[in-house]
Amino acid sequence: MRRLTILFFLTTAFVACTEKKGQKQSTDHNDLFSEVIKTAEQQIGYQVKLIEESGKILNPRTVENGYVRYISKDDWTSGFFPGTLFYMYDLTKDPKWLDAGIKYTEDLDSIKHLKWHHDVGFMINSSFGNALRATGNEAYKEVIVEAANSLATRFRPAAGVIQSWDEDRGWQAKRGWMCPVIIDNMMNLELLFKATEISGDSTYHKIAVSHANTTLENHYRNDWSCYHVVDYDKEQGGVRSKQNAQGYADESAWARGQAWGLYGFTVAYRFTHDERYLTMAEKIRHFIFSHPNLPEDLVPYWDFNAPNIPNEPRDASAAAVIASALYELVTLGLKEYEETADKIMTSLAGEAYKAIVGTNGNFLLMHSVGSIPHGNEIDVPINYADYYFLEALARKKESGSKSFLD
């Protein structure tokens, strides 16, 4: 009897200790994430203030030579700053963010006609897609559908894919490609899926599914890492070559490419409920988190196979995309991924990646990488890192998790 009493006491004490530890972890998350939202209010708020004082509508992308680099409307990242403002509204419920989001989104209306690259999906979905979600304004539906029409002009039926880049423009023209498709293009399919939901026209949905299926078949290696670029024959169909334009080498695993794939197939599953897409997302997740070169804080180096690890730049943008995708997978029933997403977000919200107020060009996150092979945006803030980080926070909050804000 005495043994049972002692055992009961020890068990009760262990459970109480575990519960307190769990409560402390929840409190730590609450405190850390609350603090990073306060920092975001100051940083992004000052970014907006400076733009408003200029009397112009400017679109910040990164910091270059110590100065904020503003971009034109047709830059592939132009939708992320407006989208960031909508996520600030989600996280704070302060109407000033909603007003700013609408203003900077509506300035991008002409993008719906852009047809010379595939990123109209990124640009319109992150801006007008969020505007529609936040306001319910019916006028934004027309923009989304027209942008989907523009994107659909890049569909190559023989190959079954949406061509990413024109083969005769810029540095891409020097590669000998015929129909280059990058893994990033999986992120543009959401626009097509939404266009079908809005219009009832299944054409957009069918194009998105064709692209996803072809990517699933050709973009991935046996270890479930992906190539960056697959070049297709757009007249006869079939693969011409597989390469890596932004990663270290053709056979390496470019970190943000792995993130785009994880996110993209998660979105494809959300709209189709095709189990193949969910299975692919899980396999990509396994590759990322089982890789021996993934750092302990779960913020990857810019390429998993970069030659000078651990002395290689990290990519906070890739980590933010991965975390946001994981939180969506949690909402799709994979609850076990929440702890990993929380760990990524805890790292990004910490001193190693979160900027001090008044620094970093008024961007929130430090240490992202655009393209090392092109010598662009190396170890700098980038607008899409902030966007996906705040999207992840908003998804965490929306989930109603006890380990987040009330």
Image (spheres, grey):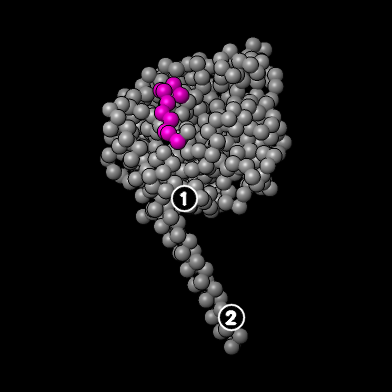
Residue type at mark 1: give it.
Answer: Ala
Q: Tell me, yes or no, whether the highlighted magenta stretch contains residue 71.
A: yes
Quadrant (top left/top right/bottom left/bottom right) for the C terminus: bottom left
Assess disc 1: are there few (<14), some (14-19) or many (≥20) residues with their C-alpha within 10 Å of its C-alpha: many
Element on which disc 2 rests? helix
Residue under the image location 32 percent in, 35 percent down: 50
Report the front residue among 61 and 322.
61
Element on which disc 1 rests? loop
Q: Where is residue 261 drawn, in percent x and y?
A: 58, 34
Q: Is residue 144 above or below residue 309?
A: above
Please identify, in this view, whether the residue under mark 2 or under mark 1 is nearer the observer: 1
- Circle 2 sits on which residue? 7
Q: Is residue 103 above or below residue 203?
A: below
Q: Where is residue 111 drawn, in percent x and y?
A: 41, 20
Q: Which mark is residue 349?
A: 1
Q: How many marks?
A: 2
Who comes first in sequence, dot 2 or dot 1?
2
For the residues labelled 2 and 1, the Cα–Cα distance comes to 41 Å
Report the front residue among 12 and 386.
386
Q: Which residues are magenta?
A: 66-75
Q: Is residue 117 above or below residue 302?
A: above
Q: In which image quadrant can residue 199 be found?
A: top left
Residue type at mark 2: give it.
Answer: Leu
